[in-house]
Amino acid sequence: MASIGRVCAVYIAFFSSSLGHAADNRLVLTGSSTVAPLAAEIGKRFEEQNPSIRVDVQSGGSSRGVADARSGLADLGMASRAPNANETDLQFFTIARDGVGIIVNMNNSVRFLTDEQIVAIYTGKITDWSKAGGAAGRITVVNKAEGRSTLELFLHYFKLKGGDVKAHVIIGENQQAIKTVAGNRGAIGYVSIGSAEYEADHGAHIRLLPMSGVAASVENVRSGSFPLARPLNLVSKGEPGAVARRFIDFARSRSVHDIVESQFFVPVAP
């Protein structure tokens, strides 16, 4: 019986090791849908310079990234927000900066909304574009799903609670919001400015609206003048492992500034 127990223990240890994410030749990142495409491109270049290492990037929202980093399901989490007060057990490493902007369909005649109008739209007090300076037409409110840092930032900025929002469509990824607004003339949503500029530059039928009189652009995020901005972070539980540390340093270096800028984000100083 003792020998069987030893065999079982060895088997379990081997099986667990074979599934483990923290092997020297594999790096697992999970979390923010804003950070994921950027991390994936950085990962490709990292793999080119480190052929023995595979970088596996999975999205799912900032909450997933933080939870997976904390539980050990991922080597690094991805979070498109600053750390919360109850996250002192985690380390956050900023690899870029981004803003969150309001988007409407390109055919929408509205060019500007006040903060008060945005709140009224999202709380159901304004339901027709004619009441917000546009042509008559029903407003379709697109909101982010729970656990998305973009939602948290939006609610915090506009001093709203989740239950205040009267949404018609709930989405997760930035690309889902962009696709929904691009395909619906009456829709309004909010997404990463970097993602929106990238998709608009590649033909998406959307327009970013200014906020507080400041154009929603990467340049204004860079200058610090845009009011709704955030860090894009990699997250580790305590001190990152050797491979994770190498990836973090690489993702924060000038070697990837071209990748950061190609995705319309703002690089951080090394």
Image (cartoon, rainbow, N blue to C red):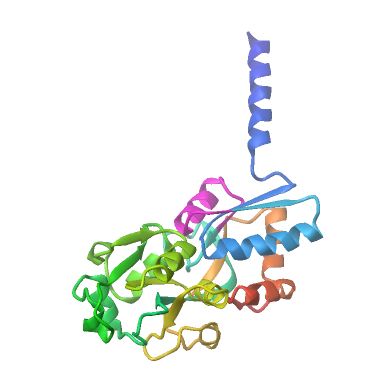
Residue in the picture at 50% in, 66% down: 80
Q: x%, y% of residue 2?
A: 65, 11
Q: Is residue 39 magenta?
A: no
Q: Residue at x 18, y 74 (%)?
A: 125
Q: With respect to residue 133, does 159 lie above or below?
A: above
Does the stretch in magenta take in 65?
A: yes
Answer left or right for 127 relative to 63. left
Instruction: Point out residue 52 in the picture as x, y percentages from the top left corner.
Output: 80, 50
Query: Hey, which residue is sitting farthest left in the picture?
Result: 125
Q: Is residue 3 left or right of residue 109?
A: right
Quick check: 57 above or below 207? above
Q: Is residue 202 left or right of residue 251?
A: left
Q: For the C terminus, which image quadrant? A: bottom right
Could you say which is closer to the camera, residue 249 or residue 211? Answer: 211
Q: Report the number of discs.
A: 0
Residue 97 on image: x %, y %:
55, 75
What segment is highlighted magenta in the picture? 58-77
Q: Quadrant of residue 159?
A: bottom left
